[in-house]
Structure formats: structure tokens, C-alpha cells
Image (cartoon, rainbow, N blue to C red):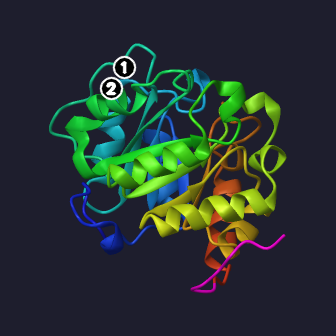
């Protein structure tokens, strides 16, 4: 398994198939206790990629240490940057959203500037509802991610009130997206209000990793993590057999 920061090439990353987003140390400990090996720290009340407080990032980092992979959400690129977390922390992945960046001709430069500190940990984000979010198109983001040598690209939804990923994109569109990411030599991470029932099919259909928050919570995505829900998610992932050459089918 990769260490606690990502300096290795994409091909060397042993990416766990399940990512669970947590907001604090208590939730992170619960997730790792139930077998989650990729922990994402964010504040769901602040949006799709809401940034958590710097102290929460530190606490989650201490729990993951070098034993588990972990990532950090930085909010939206055009928002006021969150308070910087301690410089000695080296998350495996770091990401920010691109809402409002679509009309800007220099969004790639702005993204590079924000992510320069994180090197090979920077992950690009595609919003399935990119038009409504005013974000760059899926193709433009994937092309940028490949040029920037991102280890992975995240497909997510910006507006959580508009339904899940599968209500924003067809299976054929998801298939083409996953294929384009793989052709760029990157990992394809899929999120967007996914339920546990969606996890197995998306893995079988080619996603390298599925990322969840609400499916692991009691109630809505802003509620607390639930041990039983986490246990069922881990079991679903562990019991899902994936073909090495999996592809989405309509």
C-alpha cells in the first residue's frame, strides 16, 4: 500500500475500492475500524467538496498516519481558500471543485496555482451536473487532468438536491467517462449521492473506486456515520468480483 503521501506514479497506487468521507476524528476511527482503507475528510454541510476545519484534518491525519490512504477536500476553486492545514501533513489526494470556472479561460492556471503545493496528490474533479454548476465540461477536465499528470479523476455531483449520479448521467455516459480517464492513464473515482445498491454495479462496470458519504450515514449526508451502514458497504465492496477489463454496459 502507498504511504501517507502520493509521490509514486499512478500505476503504483493500490487504490482501495471504497472511499468514505468523514468530518472528524471520531468518524475516521469508526470508518477504519469497520475496514475502510481510504478516508476523505470534508465538511458535508459546506457543499459537495466542503472543506473541513484545519484541526479536523490534523486529527484525521493522525488516525490514518502511514497505515491508510487519506484525502482532503478544499472546497471550490473560486471560493475563498480554507485555512491552510499544517504544512507537514501530506495527504494521498487533494481536490477542489470547479463550479463557476466554465466561463473562465484561465481556470487551468488557477487550478495549477492552487494545487502547486500538493504535487502528485492533486486530483481533478468532474461534476456530472457541470452545466448547471457553471463548471468546465467533463471532457475538458479529463484532458486537463491528463496533461497535469493527476493520479485520479473524481466524478461527482455538485448540487446534491438534484439526485444521484445515475440521475445526472446515463450508463453509456459513465462508460465513456471511465474509459476516457483510463485512456489518460488515471484512476476513475465515482461519487454522487450513491446508494449501497449502486456500489457493486459501478465497480463491476469499471470504476476503480466508489466514494460515499450519505450511504454511510444515519439519515442524510450531514448526519453521523452509522456503523451498520459502514459494515454493509465494506461487505458489498469485498464481495464484488471485478473483471480486470470491466466496462460499463447499457
Residue 68 locus on image (x, y percent) = 35, 60
Q: Which residue appears at 58% of the width and 29% of the height?
A: 135
Q: Position of residue 173 (x, y in %)?
A: 74, 57
Callout 2–callout 1 Cβ contact below 8 Å: yes
The region drawn magenta spans 243-250
Q: Residue at x 35, y 52 (%)?
A: 147
Total count of labels: 2
Q: Give me the C-alpha separation between circle 2 and circle 1.
A: 8 Å
Q: Nearer the viewer, residue 53 or 11?
A: 11
Q: Residue 54 carries which label?
A: 2
Seen at 33% across and 53% down, the residue is 64
Is 183 part of what is drawn in magenta?
A: no
| The quarter of the displayed image where residue 179 is located | bottom right
The residue beneath circle 1 is 82
Which quarter shows the C terminus?
bottom right
- Disc nearer the start of the sequence (2/1): 2
User: Closer to the camera, 169 or 69?
Assistant: 169
Nearest-to-viewer mark from 2 and 1: 1
Q: In this view, does 42 lie above or below 138?
A: above
Outermost residue, left direction?
Answer: 88
Question: Can you say whether 207 is above or below 141 in the image?
Answer: below
Other residues around mark 1 within 10 Å, as few (<14) / some (14–19) / many (≥20): some
The residue at the far front in this view is 105
> Tag 2's secondary structure?
helix
Kindly tell me whether residue 82 is visible in this rendering.
Answer: yes
User: Nearest the camera: 16 or 97?
Assistant: 97
Amino acid at each position: 500500500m502507498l504511504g501517507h503521501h502520493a509521490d509514486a506514479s499512478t500505476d503504483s497506487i493500490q487504490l482501495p475500492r471504497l472511499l468514505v468521507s468523514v468530518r472528524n476524528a471520531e468518524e475516521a476511527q469508526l470508518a477504519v475500524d469497520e475496514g475502510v482503507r481510504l478516508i476523505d475528510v470534508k465538511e458535508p454541510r459546506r457543499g459537495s467538496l466542503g472543506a473541513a476545519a484545519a484541526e479536523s484534518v490534523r486529527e484525521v491525519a493522525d488516525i490514518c498516519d502511514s497505515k491508510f490512504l487519506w484525502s482532503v477536500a478544499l472546497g471550490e476553486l473560486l471560493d475563498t481558500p480554507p485555512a491552510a492545514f499544517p504544512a507537514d501533513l501530506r495527504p494521498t489526494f487533494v481536490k477542489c471543485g470547479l463550479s463557476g470556472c466554465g466561463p473562465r479561460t484561465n481556470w487551468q492556471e488557477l487550478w495549477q496555482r492552487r494545487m502547486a503545493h500538493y504535487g502528485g496528490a492533486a486530483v481533478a474533479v468532474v461534476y456530472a451536473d457541470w452545466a448547471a454548476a457553471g463548471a468546465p465540461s467533463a471532457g475538458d477536465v479529463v484532458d486537463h487532468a491528463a496533461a497535469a499528470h493527476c493520479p485520479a479523476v473524481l466524478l461527482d455531483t455538485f448540487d446534491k438536491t438534484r439526485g444521484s449520479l445515475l440521475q445526472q448521467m446515463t450508463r453509456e455516459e459513465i462508460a465513456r467517462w471511465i474509459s476516457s480517464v483510463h485512456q489518460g492513464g488515471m484512476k476513475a473515482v465515482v461519487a454522487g449521492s450513491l446508494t449501497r445498491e449502486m456500489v457493486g454495479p459501478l465497480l463491476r462496470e469499471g470504476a476503480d473506486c466508489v466514494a460515499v458519504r450519505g450511504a454511510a450515514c444515519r439519515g442524510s449526508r450531514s448526519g453521523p456515520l452509522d456503523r451498520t451502514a459502514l459494515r454493509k458497504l465494506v461487505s458489498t465492496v469485498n464481495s464484488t468480483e471485478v473483471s480486470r477489463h470491466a466496462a460499463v454496459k447499457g
